[in-house]
């Protein structure tokens, strides 16, 4: 899976946000606020990866249990999918 | 003909009476170079009349010059905020919310409660980062009420408003402030223009306090807002 084309991650006033540009801005009229974990996951997803690769990357980066990491990823993906900003493979 | 709108020199040939009336106070006959040249050909009006059959040329010229102007504004360290902006004691206070929430209703309370206050722009003030600080400007594009003044005033605060039985003001966390402001501005769809707008937004949110005001329609709402924002 991969973040959809036309969504840019930017840092504004110390906060990470995702904004749509081009065609994406017609379909999605909002912004997404990301916390630190969300920003990390977004950057991985922007490169394109599988669920297992995402999990591995998160476990490498942060000192958390696999259980917590899965919960974080699931919550993130649910939000991202509801906002329709992820292309599934 | 040249106009000075928020310290940006705009070259535009006005054709229709509504805009002619609204833009009168912004005429400029000084020596500064034009910053933005905007032209609407006859073909443009024909196209818009087909796209928006409920509009007439009078309204189309007014609306689309506004849209062109606010899109250009991002190139001049500026952005529009959909808000009613009241000036009191030398500071501009912007009250932003979705249409129908009562932005203008709230700033009308300020006019009653605080003699000497005035509306800078009742619907779409321009915000610009200047050498002297962050300023709000009146523009000819002020929505239904025609209330605007051709001047710039340093911003004292930005306030997102919502209706409530009682009056309360609180500081808005940065992420909520970004979300609210992004939802009440013109968003460029081109990447370079979006980046310019986000640069301006970064400076605005980092330097201007943003609040949430829950308010009713009594005069005390204006007092609660002013006391919370005057610093």
Image (cartoon, rainbow, N blue to C red):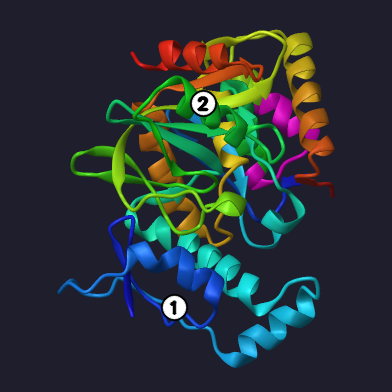
Q: Which residue is mark 1?
A: B38
Secondary structure under the numbered disc 2 in the rendered image: strand
Is residue B186 visible from the viewing direction of this image? no
Q: Which residue is mark 2?
A: B159
Q: Is residue B69 above or below residue B117?
A: below
Which span is picked out in magenta? Answer: A46-57
Residue B103 quadrant? top right
Is residue A6 visible from the viewing direction of this image? yes
Residue occupying image coordinates x 61% and y 10%: B167
Q: Is residue B222 above or below residue B6?
A: above
Quadrant location, the N terminus of chain B: bottom left
Q: Is residue B90 above or below residue B226?
A: below
- Residue B126 in percent (x, y) is at 42, 49
- Residue B219 in percent (x, y) is at 56, 16
Q: Earlier in the sequence, mark 1 or mark 2?
A: 1
Instruction: Please rate how many residues cluster around mark 1, counting C-alpha atoms within 10 Å: few if below 14, some from 14 to 19, many from 20.
Output: few
- Residue B83 in percent (x, y) is at 54, 39
Foreground pick, B175 / B62: B62
Residue occupying image coordinates x 17% and y 72%: B30
Foreground pick, B8 / A37: B8
Secondary structure under the numbered disc 1 in the rendered image: loop
């Amino acid at each position: 899976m991969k973040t959809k084309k036309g969504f840019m991650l930017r840092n504004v006033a110390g906060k990470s946000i995702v904004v749509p540009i081009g065609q994406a801005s017609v379909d999605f009229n909002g912004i997404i606020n990301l916390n630190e974990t969300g920003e990390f996951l977004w950057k991985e997803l922007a490169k394109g990866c599988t669920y297992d690769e995402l999990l591995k990357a998160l476990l490498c980066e942060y000192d958390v249990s696999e259980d917590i990491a899965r919960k974080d990823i699931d919550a993130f993906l649910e939000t991202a999918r509801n906002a329709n900003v992820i292309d599934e493979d | 003909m040249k106009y000075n709108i928020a310290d940006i020199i705009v070259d535009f040939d006005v054709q229709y009476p509504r805009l002619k009336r609204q833009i009168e106070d912004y005429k400029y006959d000084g020596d500064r170079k034009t910053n933005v040249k905007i032209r609407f050909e006859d073909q443009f009006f024909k196209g818009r009349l087909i796209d928006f059959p409920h509009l007439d040329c009078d309204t189309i010229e007014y609306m689309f010059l506004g849209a062109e102007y606010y899109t250009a504004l991002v190139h001049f360290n500026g952005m529009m905020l959909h808000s009613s902006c009241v000036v009191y004691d030398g500071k501009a206070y912007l009250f932003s919310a979705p249409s129908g929430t009562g932005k203008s209703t709230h700033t009308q309370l300020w006019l009653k409660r605080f003699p000497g206050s005035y509306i800078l722009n009742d619907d779409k003030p321009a915000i610009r980062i200047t050498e002297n600080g962050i300023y709000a400007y009146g523009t000819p594009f002020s929505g239904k009420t025609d209330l605007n003044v051709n001047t710039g005033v340093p911003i004292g605060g930005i306030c997102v408003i919502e209706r409530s039985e009682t009056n309360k003001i609180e500081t808005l966390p940065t992420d909520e402030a970004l979300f609210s402001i992004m939802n009440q501005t013109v968003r460029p769809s081109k990447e370079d223009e979006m980046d310019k707008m986000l640069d301006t937004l970064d400076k605005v949110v980092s330097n201007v306090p943003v609040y949430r005001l829950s308010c009713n329609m009594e005069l005390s709402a204006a007092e609660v807002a002013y006391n919370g924002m005057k610093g």
